[in-house]
Amino acid sequence: MFKRLYQQVLFWAEHPKANWYLFTLSFAESSFFPIPPDVMLAPMCLAKPSKSFYFAMITTIGSVIGGVFGYLIGMFSFELIEPIIEMFHYREKLEHVNAWFIDWGFWAILIAGFSPIPYKLFTIAAGLLGMMFIPFVLASLVGRGARFFLVAFLVSLGGNSLKNKLNDYIEVTGWIVTAMIVMGLLISRFY
């Protein structure tokens, strides 16, 4: 099951419009979409290791522009995105983000840009709370850039040998990741 999916993802990563898809996913994830661009960036770097940093740059630019869009949503149109926040059960997380902004500001954006914390909540909160725009963009560039260039670097280090090893162990890896996601969802329901 996972081997076929893995082959399909590698095929999509080599699609002529894959760069645009990567940019679009990066933009959307930073403001409203729940799937991170890493799921497309990593296979693209795996398929073409020599272009890894180019792909990281596309991802970073798309993500920062999407972050600016999220900032504008928070600043001007929060009531439009509020149902989406409710749908994905992000209300409580948004309240935590607001508290972090009061204490950390610039550093909260930088850390959110690098970490697996939903960056979109921070972009919207930054606009909602009126964070200064230039520090917001700079923190986003540093945080998102560091994350995506690190992913590109690590995947490109593996090159074809990583691609072949993943092909050999994709079933086991897929089931382990699936089990971890299920466990994470179950644990989050209790806490």
Image: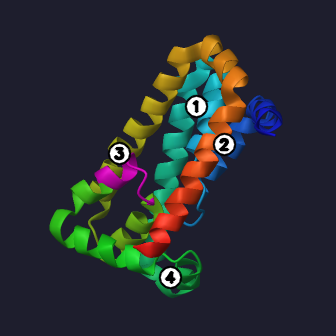
Label 2–label 4 contact, CB within 8 A: no
What range of the chain is rendered magenta?
Answer: 110-118
Q: Which one is earlier in the sequence, the residue at label 3 or at label 2? A: 3
Residue of label 4: 77
The amino acid type found where label 1 is placed reads: Phe
Taking 7 as reference, is 177 above or below it?
A: below
Label 1–label 2 contact, CB within 8 A: no
Residue of label 1: 55
Taking 82 as reference, is 171 above or below it?
A: above
Q: CA distance from mark 3 to mark 2?
A: 30 Å
Question: Which quadrant of the structure image shows residue 161?
Answer: top right
10 Å crowding of disc 2: few (<14), some (14-19), many (20+): few
Horizontal and vertical percent position of residue 55: 58, 31
Q: Nearer the viewer, mark 1 or mark 4?
A: 1
Which label sits on residue 143? 3
Q: Nearer the viewer, mark 2 or mark 4?
A: 2
- Which residue is drawn at the image coordinates 66% and 33% (left, top)? 172
Q: Nearer the viewer, mark 3 or mark 2?
A: 2
- Which residue is drawn at the image coordinates 51% and 28% (left, top)? 152
The amino acid type found where label 3 is placed reads: Gly
Label 3–label 2 contact, CB within 8 A: no
Residue of label 2: 175
Question: Which quadrant of the structure image shows residue 131?
Answer: bottom left
Q: Which one is earlier in the sequence, the residue at label 3 or at label 1? A: 1
Q: CA distance from mark 2 to mark 4?
A: 40 Å
Element under label 3? helix
Residue extending furthest toward the top? 161
